[in-house]
Image (cartoon, rainbow, N blue to C red):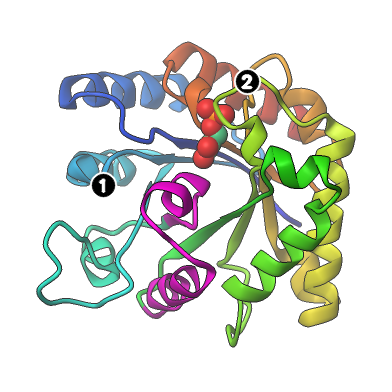
Amino acid sequence: MRKTIIAGNWKMNKTFLEADDFFANLVENIEDKELFGVEIVVCPPSLYLELASDTAQESAIFMGAQNVSEHDSGAFTGEISAPMLSSMDLEFCIVGHSERRKYFGDTDELVNMKIQNLLKNNISPIVCLGESLAERENEQTKEVVLGQLEGAFHNIEMSEEIVIAYEPIWAIGTGKTASPQQAQEIHKLIRDWLSEKYSDEIAGKTHILYGGSMNPGNVENLLQQPDIDGGLIGGASLETGKFNDMIDVAIALRNN
Ligand code: 13P
């Protein structure tokens, strides 16, 4: 049975002290809780990965990076490699986020190389994809998502370690969430693609997260959809109260 993954993507936010406070609060919130198959993941800026890794070791929280180089090592100033992330005991790494695609030129081919590097180093990639507003309005959503899937997973042997995040670009940071029906439609499309390309077993085991203005008010309806296995949360993951509330909703749904 798939878990429910509640993952926070902090993007470029929080100072070290704020990160430290956040982790202390999160650990306290979940310390005595039965999680009922809810997995909590936080992806802070890489600068704080040591703090994150120490927190993960002392708690039930998993940690992830927000990006990785497609190279293993060498003269790539400012970059961080998969072997480095692995040496910090990280479990997850986001790849192909639309902000990386837009501002840093991450293509499907680069995303593919990054996924391969992460898998070689036993880190679970959280592979992001999703359409822009113009693509949705032109009814190209399915074509775009299927194209991104083909590109990202070209020649990749699928494993349950891989997580996919459907993040419609028009819903990211805009306060405009996809309706549960809109999100479910694309999550099902992704699961059907996994079935066809790999197997029913792989499709059944793969976690597909929704991302895009997820918050305590809409998380319940989204998580109730059969193919939504959690959330990749930006803005609302920065506030301890909101993030804790969303974790509590996920736990309550699992416990029902
Ligand atoms: P928001 O939750 O701020 O819309 O961001 C979503 C996201 O991009 C997570 O990766």
Count of picture labels = 2
Residue 171: image quadrant is top right
Q: Amino acid at mark 1?
A: Ser
Range drawn in magenta: 93-120
Expressed as whole percent of the image width and height from the top left, the position of residue 112 reads 50, 74
Expressed as whole percent of the image width and height from the top left, the position of residue 91 reads 40, 57
Residue 217: image quadrant is top right
Q: Amino acid at mark 2?
A: Asn
Residue 115 shown in magenta:
yes
Q: Is residue 85 left or right of residue 134?
A: left
Q: Is mark 2 within 8 Å of ligand 1?
A: yes
Q: Residue at x 27, y 24 (%)?
A: 14
Q: In front here: 190 or 172?
A: 172
From the image, tell me which residue sits under label 2: 215
Expressed as whole percent of the image width and height from the top left, the position of residue 125 reads 49, 62
Q: Which label was assigned to residue 53?
A: 1
